[in-house]
Amino acid sequence: MINYIEVIIKVIKFVHIIIFLSILCSFLSATIINVPGQYPTIQAGINASTDGDTILVQPGTYYENINYSGKNVAVGSLFLTTEDSIYIELTIINGSQSGSVVTFENGESPSALICGFIITNGSGNIMPNGVYSGGGIFCHKDSDPTIKNNIITQNNAGDGGGLFCYIHSDPTIINVEISYNTAYDDGGGIHCNFGSCPIITNSKIMYNMCYDKGAGICCGHNEHLSNLTLNYVVICSNTSYEKGGAIYVANSISYLNNVTISENYSTYSGIYCTNSIINIINGILWNNYPQEIYLYNGGYLNATYSDIQNSWVGVGNINEDPLFVNPYNGDYHLQEDSPCIDAGDPNSPQDPDGTIADMGAYYFHQEGFINADFSGYPLSGIIPLEVQFTDLSIGNSIGWMWDFENDGIVDSNEQNPLYLYEQVGNYSVALTVTDGFIEDTEIKLNYITVIDTTNLNNNIYSFHTKLNQNYPNPFNPETTLSFSLFEKGYVSLEIFNIKGEKIRTLINEELLSGEYKIVWNGKDNLNQPVPSGVYLYQLKIGNKIYAKKMLLLK
């Protein structure tokens, strides 16, 4: 018997590999255009580009509406080159309610990439029927872009508050959050129609709203078949005033693999299916209001190995509380005693821990999971330098092996040791942790710098420009930020909240080369205490920007 879901997953993986190789080849042979270094706006960079080029965008907020104009180019924040998610939060394209924030409407291929941005405050492009569509991203007329590692949030339109796909447009959507978008008609998060078939993988569609059909996703309307493929997708806490709090499908064939659909609200159901076929495998449908599924006018839903509240006939289906970790705060991972663990189709690909597939978008790792990490303070100073190391590893560590000079010799087995450096130099540090069964090692290269004051005036030692991790972290109520400058320059050190709003300026002046430390007291520019949460601190020296995250816990 053919395992259709395994075939689908293999096809999807193959498509992702082709896309990756295509992008890689473009990187190797193409021009990198820097914004705002070479061009002041993203659109100016696109206009100057040719197929295969990369427009690399520095952190900041860009108030513009960009159109790829048929060019198969990559537009990315520094996440594209560093894979540091902080650059997604620091690089914002704001559409200023002047149309769709990002437009693909000239047959762009999967090589047209948008990666690493917050895409916000769009209002959609006007369609021939007079409806503004695609508040965040607008895909039209055979456009098949790759939309990867973005946050599409707080956009609005008539159709497709977050994303609109129309006339055979088949975007590939990977690792994307689509949240807090509004459609005044259909598709609060996504609207696809007229033969458009998006493939969505490892993504979240949450807190969207619409006034008619499909608060999370609206797929199909007319005789042109629009197919929907979801893999490891969370669709939760969306609200429709009419049909389909999570998904509305019409004239469609949809494949839902390892989805979690929960806490969605509408007049009818979480999933509304009319004249369509929906295939669900390894899914969870739970606590959708007023019911999980509503079938109308020949709608058919085939579910197997899924947890569906109030039951649904199908092989391997169950009707048990999935035991999410914290659904009321948006955490739909499974608790360790969830009935959905190892309850998926035994013929599906195994979970990464080598066990039978779990139900839902997030699998529960059953083996001992451990991830080594650590911090040190101070990271530089004058000989002799005493450094306090702190274990930040994830998992149930019971053993620690510190190598403070990365020379293969274990210097300490304490969890949080002190170490005295007595010789000048740059030192790499390694920590290996174990839970008794498995172990993991973290190495930080050139992590500690020890200097001798007698060498400073002889120019034997020179500082490297570097922004260090704050200490302590997490902190309450204050923490120390430190950095080093290679040369004299104008420096700004600023703090931003998770929305990218600047809340405090700590330094804004010219400084000499050297080491600097400054204490932040957890207050904003108005001297008011800020709430608990993740904050970003950014060091800007000339055209170079360095940024890190810190966590305030009260």
Image (cartoon, helix red, strand yellow):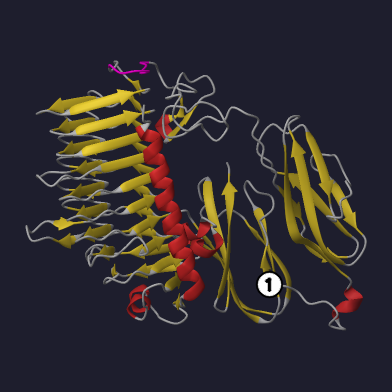
User: Which image quarter: residue 83?
Assistant: bottom right
Corner quadrant of residue 205 = top left
- Per the rendered image, the range of residues in magenta is 313-319
Q: Residues within 10 Å of mark 1 (few under 14, many from 20)?
A: some
The residue positioned 66% from the left and 41% from the top of the image is 371
Q: Is residue 209 left or right of residue 491?
A: left
Secondary structure mostly taken by the magenta-highlighted segment of the chain: loop
In reply to whether residue 314 is colored magenta, the answer given is: yes
Quadrant showing the N terminus: top left
Place of residue 153 in the rendered image (x, y in percent of width and height, measured from the top left)? 33, 52
Furthest-front residue in view?
Answer: 1
Amino acid type, residue under disc 1 in the picture: Thr
Query: Which of the pair 357/163 is nearer the observer?
Result: 357
Q: Which quadrant, please, contains the C terminus?
A: top right
Q: Which residue is mark 1?
A: 465
Q: Is residue 270 above or below residue 191?
A: above
* Residue 188 rendering spot, x and y as whole percentages: 23, 45
Residue at position x 62%, y 48% from top? Answer: 477
Q: Is residue 242 magenta?
A: no
Residue at (49% x, 23% y) in the render: 341
Between 183 and 320, the residue placed more toward the observer is 320
**x, y (%) of residue 182?**
23, 48
Where 247 falls versus 73 (above or below)?
A: above
Direction from residue 70 to residue 537 in the image, left or right = right
Q: Secondary structure at mark 1?
A: loop
